[in-house]
Each structure stands twice: as structure tokens, then as C-alpha cells.
Image (cartoon, rainbow, N blue to C red):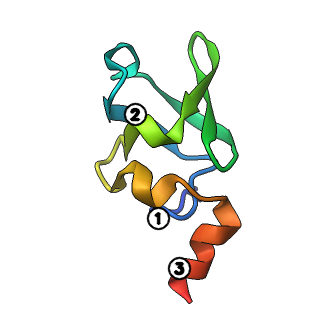
């Protein structure tokens, strides 16, 4: 049973890949998002936890359902929910 939400507003718990970034060294990093703040996400990768700034990267999930950029991500999780209302 999979409980993953295919929505850009619910990132914690998602398996994501960095598909584009201003920092070319982090493109292709993939893992599960375990924590999120206003400006950073923490990804659990096979090489340990990585702190990734939201404002320089574009994320996509492995199934190509989530494709979003930093303008939508650069808010706190509860602030993104206000967009839906």
C-alpha cells in the first residue's frame, strides 16, 4: 500500500530527483525528503542526508508526476496550503 501524495504541496516523504539546478554538481541527486523548512529541504540519499536549498533547484519525482520549480517551493509547507484555498 502506497500512501504517497502526488502533489507539489506535500513534499515530505516523497522520493524526488533534482532535475535542474543553478549548481550543476547537485543535478541527479535523488532520495526521500525527510524535512522541509522555508528555504531548505533535507533529503535522505544513499550517501546520507543532504541539505538542498530550494531556491536553486527544480524537483521531479521518479514517476514524473511532480515537476515544480523554486517559485512554488520557496514557502513554508503550511503557506503553500493557503494557495489551495
Q: Quadrant of residue 71?
A: bottom left
Mark nearer the N terminus (2 vs 3): 2
Rounded to the nearest angstrom, the CA distance separating label 1 from label 2 is 15 Å
Check contact, mark 2 vs mark 3: CB within 8 A.
Answer: no
Q: Position of residue 18 (x, y in %)?
A: 38, 32
The residue positioned 66% from the left and 59% from the top of the image is 76
The residue positioned 57% from the left and 35% from the top of the image is 32
Checking the image for residue 83, the label placed there is: 3
Rounded to the nearest angstrom, the CA distance separating label 2 from label 3 is 24 Å
Q: Residue furthest top?
A: 47
Vertical arrangement, residue 23 with respect to residue 17, above or below: above
Q: Residues within 10 Å of mark 1 (few under 14, many from 20)?
A: few
Q: Quadrant of the N terminus?
A: bottom right
Look at mark 2 in the image and give the residue it sits on.
Answer: 17
The residue positioned 31% from the left and 18% from the top of the image is 24
Q: Quadrant of the C terminus?
A: bottom right
Amino acid at each position: 500500500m502506497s500512501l504517497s501524495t502526488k502533489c507539489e504541496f506535500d513534499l515530505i516523504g516523497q522520493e524526488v530527483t533534482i532535475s535542474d539546478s543553478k549548481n550543476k554538481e547537485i543535478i541527479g541527486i535523488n532520495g526521500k525528503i525527510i524535512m522541509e523548512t522555508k528555504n531548505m529541504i533535507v533529503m535522505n540519499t544513499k550517501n546520507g542526508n543532504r541539505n538542498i536549498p530550494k531556491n536553486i533547484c527544480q524537483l521531479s519525482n521518479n514517476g514524473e508526476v511532480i515537476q515544480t520549480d523554486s517559485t512554488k517551493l520557496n514557502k513554508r509547507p503550511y503557506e503553500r496550503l493557503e494557495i489551495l484555498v
